[in-house]
Structures are given as C-alpha cells and as structure tokens.
Image (cartoon, grey):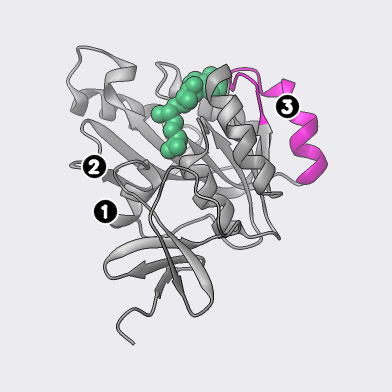
C-alpha cells in the first residue's frame, strides 16, 4: 500500500517522505500539525521546521535514544511541540519529564500534559536541577535513559552537564540542540562549535554531529554518550 507508514526508528515513521509519530492522544493537535489516519492509527506528521529533533532525524540522526517504554528528561520543553512527539514515541509505558521556566510556555505545556499522562510538566529553571530531583527520582529512580536539551542559553553546556551528571544513566545518551548565536552573538559559529565540542568531551563521547541547516541556521545538533 502506497500510504503504509515505514518505521525508521521504534515509534518514528515515514509517511510519503514525511516523518511522523503515532498519536498517544488521538483527536488532539499540539501545534496544528497535520494528521493522518492509517489502519486505524492516527499519525501526527512531525514538522522538522518547528522541531530541532525532527530536523536532526530528517538530516540523518543514526540512533535515536528515545524509545518505547523509555524515560526522557526534556530540558526547554517550551509549549510542548517536540516534547509531544517524544511522548508519542515513549508511549504510555514511558515517561517524559518536561522542564520549562517561562510562565507563558508553562501554561501551554500544562494543557498538553493534561492530555498525555506520560508527560510531566516541571516548571523550574534547569540551572537548579536539585529543585526537581525528587520528581524525577520518584518515576525514574535509576536515572533516565536520555536527556534532550534545547534551551538556547549561553550556559547550554553547563546546564547539560549538571543535569546529566545528576539524572542520566551511565552510558545513556544526551541530545543537544546548540544555537551558536545564543552562546555568542558575534563569534564565528564554527569556532563556537569547536569550543563546545572541547567542553563536552570531559563528560561525553561525541557520537554524532549534525548541522541543522536549512531547517535551523547556525544550529548544531550533538548526540553524546555519557562516560561515567
Ligand atoms: C528553543 S525553545 C525550545 C523549543 C522546544 N524544544 C520545541 O522544540 O518544542 C527554548 C525553551 O527553553 C526555555 N529555557 C531557556 N532556559 C531555560 C532554563 N534555564 N530552564 C528552563 N527552561 C529554559 C525557554 O523558556 C524556551 O521555552
């Protein structure tokens, strides 16, 4: 059948060349995304122009550490656009901890979480992980399988490190969407990337590096494996 979804990662599908996830909350859209019902399943087409994780998948991410039944710490969840696809992928057997500190975004995020039991909103600043350690420990006492971070903050690397040190399982994977212009408004993006790569290598092995252009200009996406 021409329309049959082809699975490219567990929980991620290709439908006529577009990536998609099977909706955990059929009938509810999160960011006015296109949907398609095939074989009794409602798929949500994943817009790579509105999601850096979506863009990384389209641009050739080799391994997706976010899997059905898995636990994910999502830092910089905003109003839940990408986090909702992560929620679809981990299914009701998994959990997505959604850290976000902007009040307006949190209001929208909470509405999305109300439709999805596996998404837990954490209205906190990711620079103080001790403030949500109890919430994470309750659902994921051994740590999380993956950390995804997209905060567009000059301190992105430090925020990633302190959260992974506390919450990511040894050997677990961190995905970092890095915005060069947030680290430095004027520096050469290639020099900024080189500096960030040096900084992350104290704690992580760099598994893959993806330039997100043309979806996001001056953004680098990193897949990192925690060393210890
Ligand atoms: C680029 S947006 C994230 C978009 C989102 N990842 C998506 O694809 O749907 C960055 C978000 O990170 C949040 N953020 C930035 N610094 C943060 C911090 N220290 N703690 C928590 N959230 C933060 C911002 O409020 C913003 O909503």
Which numbered disc, 3 or 2, marks the residue that appears first in the sequence? 3
Picture residue at 68% right of the left edge, 56% below the top = 94
Tell me if mark 1 has few (under 14), some (14-19) or many (20+) residues whose alpha carbon lies within 10 angstroms of its own. some
- The label shown at residue 59 is 1
Mark 1 residue's CB less than 8 Å from ligand 1:
no
Magenta residues span 122-141
Q: Is residue 97 visible?
A: yes
Residue corresponding to mark 2: 215
Crowd rating for badge 2 (residues with CA inside 10 Å; few <14, some 14–19, many 20+): some
**How far from the left and from the top, in percent, is residue 179?**
32, 27
**Disc 2 from disc 1: Cα separation:** 9 Å
From the viewer's perspective, is the residue at label 2 or at label 1 nearer?
2
Q: Is residue 134 magenta?
A: yes
- From the viewer's perspective, tell me whether residue 61 is left or right of residue 190: right
Q: Nearer the viewer, residue 219 or 21?
A: 21
Residue positioned 58% across, 33% down in the render: 109
Residue 23 lies in the magenta-colored region? no
Residue 132 numbered mark, or none: 3
Q: Where's residue 193, x and y in %? A: 27, 29
Mark 2, ligand 1, within 8 Å: the answer is no
Of 29 and 161, nearer the camera is 29
Residue 53 position (above or below residue 128): below
Query: Looking at the picture, does residue 82 appear above or below residue 62?
Result: above
Instruction: Name the quarter where the C terminus is drawn.
Output: top right
Q: Is mark 2 in CB contact (under 8 Å) with mark 1?
A: yes
Rendering coords of residue 6 (x, y %): 38, 76
């Amino acid at each position: 059948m021409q329309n049959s979804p082809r699975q490219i990662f567990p929980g991620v599908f290709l439908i006529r060349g577009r990536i998609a996830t099977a909706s955990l909350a059929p009938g509810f859209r999160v960011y006015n995304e296109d949907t398609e019902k095939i074989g009794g399943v409602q798929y949500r087409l994943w817009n790579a122009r509105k999601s850096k994780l979506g863009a990384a998948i389209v641009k050739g991410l080799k391994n997706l550490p976010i899997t059905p039944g898995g636990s994910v710490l999502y830092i910089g969840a905003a109003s839940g656009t990408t986090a909702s696809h992560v929620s679809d992928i981990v299914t009701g057997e998994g959990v997505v901890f959604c850290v976000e500190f902007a009040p307006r975004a949190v209001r929208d995020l909470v509405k999305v979480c109300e439709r999805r039991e596996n998404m837990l909103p954490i209205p906190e600043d990711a620079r103080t992980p001790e403030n949500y350690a109890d919430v994470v420990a309750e659902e994921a006492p051994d740590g999380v399988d993956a950390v995804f971070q997209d905060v567009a903050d000059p301190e992105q690397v430090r925020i990633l490190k302190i959260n992974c040190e506390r919450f990511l399982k040894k050997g677990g994977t961190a995905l970092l969407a890095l915005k060069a212009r947030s680290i430095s408004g004027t520096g050469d993006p290639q020099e900024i990337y080189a500096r960030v790569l040096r900084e992350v290598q104290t704690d992580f092995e760099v598994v893959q590096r993806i330039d997100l252009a043309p979806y996001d200009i001056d953004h680098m996406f990193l897949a990192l494996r925690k060393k210890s």
